[in-house]
Image (spheres, grey):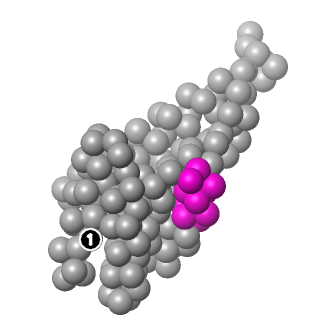
Amino acid sequence: MSTEADFDVTLGHKKFAAAAFNHAWDFIDMKTRTDEDVRQMLDAAHASSWHWRHRDDATPQNRSIADWQLSRVHALAGNGAMALDYGNLCLVSANETGLPFYIGYAYEAIARANWVLGNLDDARVALAAAEEQIALVSSVDEIALLRPDLGDIAAKIGA
């Protein structure tokens, strides 16, 4: 018979953080979502973040990614205020990394959240900050990830 003492909590956080993140990503990639899809997407992103925050090996980079995903799923769900809160948290962790790719994505999240809220001027300011960061990114792969998301926001806000 298995007991709670047999469960490896550290390993559980590692497995569940990644599994929930990937599950949320499946919903992010959908072109259309039912109300149930949105609930599952939000649940998965929050579960992933919770497990990441309980890992002993979590870094500011990991927290930045988790908060970015939370911002994105809330934006997709139409929860602009929550998307902005998580975008701002993402920026705090991204700044701790000092890496332009993560800082650029934090500003992308803030721009997207402001678009959802209808704050187009604030969205344009955040988009400009993201563009400043992408200019500092040296990895072609990272640029290839960030550039389309910035283009998506630019098209939405008429920038």
Total of numbered circles in the picture? 1
Q: Label 1, on which residue?
A: 153
Q: Is residue 63 visible?
A: no
Q: Main secondary structure of the magenta part?
A: helix
Q: Is residue 31 visible?
A: yes
Give the residue at x 61% y 63%. Answer: 92
Of 114 and 92, the residue lying toward us? 92
Please provide the residue range marked out in magenta: 89-98
Of 48 and 137, the residue lying toward us? 137
Residue 79 screen position, x and y as percent: 43, 74
Residue 93 belongs to magenta span: yes
Residue at the limit of the structure toward the top, as seen here: 1
Residue 73 vs residue 5: left or right?
left
Residue 58, quarter of the rendered image? top right
Residue 19 screen position, x and y as percent: 47, 34
Residue 18 vs residue 146: left or right?
right
Give the residue at x 63% y 55%. Answer: 96
